[in-house]
Image (cartoon, helix red, strand yellow):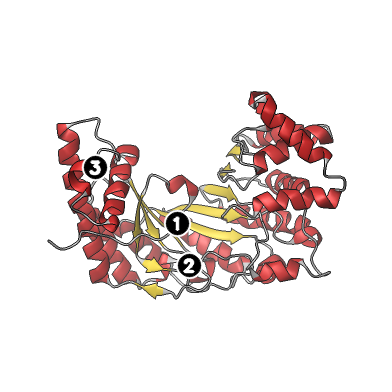
Amino acid sequence: MDKKIFSVGNIRPPFHASSLLLQFTENCPWNRCNFCTLYRGGKFKIRSVEEIKADIDAVTYYRDLILERLRDNDKYTVKRMGDISSSISCEEKRCYSMVLNWIVNDHMKTVFLQDANTIVMKKNDLCELLKYLREKLPSLETVACYGRADTLTRLSLEDFRDLKDAGLTMLHSGFESGCDDVLKLLNKGSNRNQQIDCGKKIKEAGIEYNVFYMPGAGGKALSERNAKETADVVNQINPEFLRIRTFVVKPGAPMWDIASSPDFEECTDIEKVREIRTMISLLEGIDSYIISDHIINLLPQIEGYADKDKGKILNYIDEFLALPEKKQREFQLARRMCANVDYMEMSLLPDRYMDQIRGMINRTDTDEKWEETLRYYLRKYI
């Protein structure tokens, strides 16, 4: 029997952890953003319609197999694969486990199409595949993918409507900033006019839109403009979601050399929080849902609708900023060391852990060393 496998990439938004992942394209066609190392060294490829249909067929094979087993034993889990593990390859085990996770935790509702810019595919090919996907997996409610602003702006309103009719329901776009000078600094390959143009068309076509914002991306010199001009872009589009992704300079990225030069001064952890506050305070006339849904963000409970919850969100940020420096630093270090707590929940941490935190703070005798300590931990994140 031929191997039953399907291709899966490495990157997806955090909240797609239980989604079925299908690789329609490989790597990133731009792959020149100064801050990004995710696809360095990888060659961009658009997979063929035939390859992708075969992958979808493999998913349906595992879906049917697992559903039959679940009917026989409703407590079946990933660990209970002994009856098949000796007869299939490691690749097949990985595919089997992903489909099982998708069935049990997502209830077969969501698919995320990888990699970095799936929307670059020929529209007719993508529509054909979306229809095939819907035919084979009729339980789907959400089909999502990434799309770069410079690619999205090339599509017409009618193109987006065709994609929606074929089955695409959600798009994610890493704007990072709505400020052209910041976008140039990041070598993003797109501009604010493209962001606004494509965003309006996507909204009018009825496709759910997720926009990503990167506080601190412009450094200290451009921090205020990053906040103000990003808010202006978001106000003109009114995306369903505005997702925060804190800017971090990582070794191996071109931004590492830029940040080491006298021309760029990185924002501190607290300055990034202040930038987020400024950006949110300027959101007006929209009902976008703001969410801090990544471990890289300092404040995890920045969440709510721009129209109904803005005051609550700003108060939450202000209460953190009003804390004594010692309390701020205890929380910052705990969070950067992956403690899953908010600043209001620090009492939940064990005394032994807090003693370690306080000892590290006491040994950090300058502000510069303090920020470098935080960045050391941040660089460990994707």
Tag 1: residue type?
A: Leu
Residue 152: image tag: 2
Q: Left or right of 132: which side holds 310?
A: right
Q: State the image coordinates of residue 38 (x, y, percent, origin top left).
A: 53, 64
Of residue 51 and residue 256, the one placed in the foreground of this image is 256
- Label 1 SS: strand
Looking at the image, tell me whether mark 3 or mark 1 is earlier in sequence order: 3
* Residue holding disc 1: 171
Tag 2: residue type?
A: Leu
Q: State the image coordinates of residue 326 (x, y, percent, origin top left).
A: 82, 34
| Residue drawn where x is 78% and y is 36% of the image | 359
Packing grade of label 1 (10 A; few <14, some 14-19, many >=20) is many
- Label 3 SS: loop
Specify whether residue 275 is in view: no
Q: CA distance from mark 3 to mark 2?
A: 42 Å
Residue 81: image tag: 3
| Residue drawn where x is 51% and y is 47% of the image | 240
